[in-house]
Amino acid sequence: MKYISFIRCGKAGFGLLTVRGNGQQAIIDLTHKLGSDIDNLQDAISNHKLEDAEKFADAPADFFLSDVTLLPVIPNPSKILCIGLNYETHRAETKRPDAKYPTIFTRFADSQVAHGQPLIIPHVSERFDYEGELAIIIAQGGRYVEEADAMQHVAGYACYNDATARDWQRHTHQFTPGKTFPATGAFGPYMADAKSIGDYTKLKIQTRLNGKIMQDADLSQLIFSIPKLIAYCSSFTPLTAGDVIITGTPGGVGDRREPPIYMQAGDVVEVEISKLGTLSNPIIAE
């Protein structure tokens, strides 16, 4: 099941993304169908309504993908927790030491854009870099979640581009200033529910810049697994439905290449994860 968030006729909604016989991508509108007060994906997750949504899978399409403007999969999560240095290839290229615990920073919800929308190079930055990542969307909240139970707390997965102003990231040892400029985090195009994905370690991730492969990895290569991340994060903050954990980027970032490669206005960056589609965004200058 593929879930999207969108705006149509000036109103936000959510629905199932499907393909009809003519090959067109169509939307089954779920806004208010799972309850009169459920008008967004985050509420559907919070109220445990995704299973109810499955009965609409074969319903007639309400409109086509071309009729809507996509929103980030979860437009306004209460928390976006970002994991750094979570692939050995990336840790090695940064020359950072092994770590006993995950590196964690935050991204603000209003820094996100959807699939197809531009990522904006801040005019105060000269080092705007890509970071293709897998995003986890939390199904049910909790505190001190045990690793053994952690996967029960996953609603689904999506592609994410945690693009970074590297010069601002390095102003101090704190990452956040470089990680949360407006319109620098791309999230989409859709969330695939956890049941349809199965074993996430079988997924492959690839980032392309203007069609050239820059990052290429398997999700089995995460240093800290998804259960470990959920258990660790839920220890220092209560997780709530719709929260997002971005699991880290593989080696191959532009900043660590010789010479460095940074995104420029006119570029197109794509993050593709098997079973999760391709997140594509043009790059523009502020």
Image: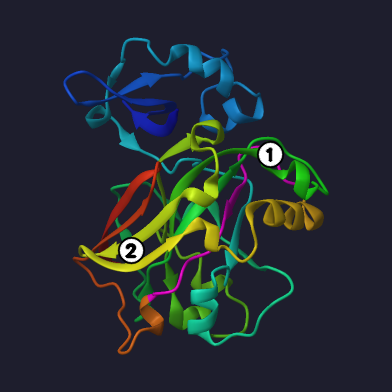
> Magenta region: which residues?
238-253
Does residue 32 appear in this view?
no
Please tell me which residue lies in front, 57 or 199: 199
Kindly report the distance in space between the C-alpha atoms of the residues bearing marks 2 and 1: 33 Å
Q: Is residue 53 above or below residue 129?
A: above
Residue displayed at 57% across by 20% down: 51
Q: Magenta stretch: residue 242 in it?
A: yes
Check residue 120 in the rendering and tell me which mark sits there, or answer none. Answer: 2
Q: Quick one: label 2 or label 1, which is nearer the N terminus? A: 2
Q: Is residue 162 above or below residue 5?
A: below
Q: Nearer the viewer, mark 2 or mark 1?
A: 1
Query: From the viewer's perspective, is 38 left or right of 114?
Result: right
Q: Considering the image in quadrants, where does the C terminus appear?
A: bottom left
Occupied quadrant, residue 48: top right
Q: Say what secondary structure mark 1 lies in.
A: helix
Q: Is residue 15 visible?
A: yes
Q: Residue 165: x percent and y percent?
A: 43, 74
Q: Quadrant of residue 253?
A: bottom left
Image quarter in which the N terminus is found: top left
Residue drawn 50% across and 64% down? Answer: 180
Q: Which mark is residue 153?
A: 1
Q: Main secondary structure of the magenta part?
A: loop
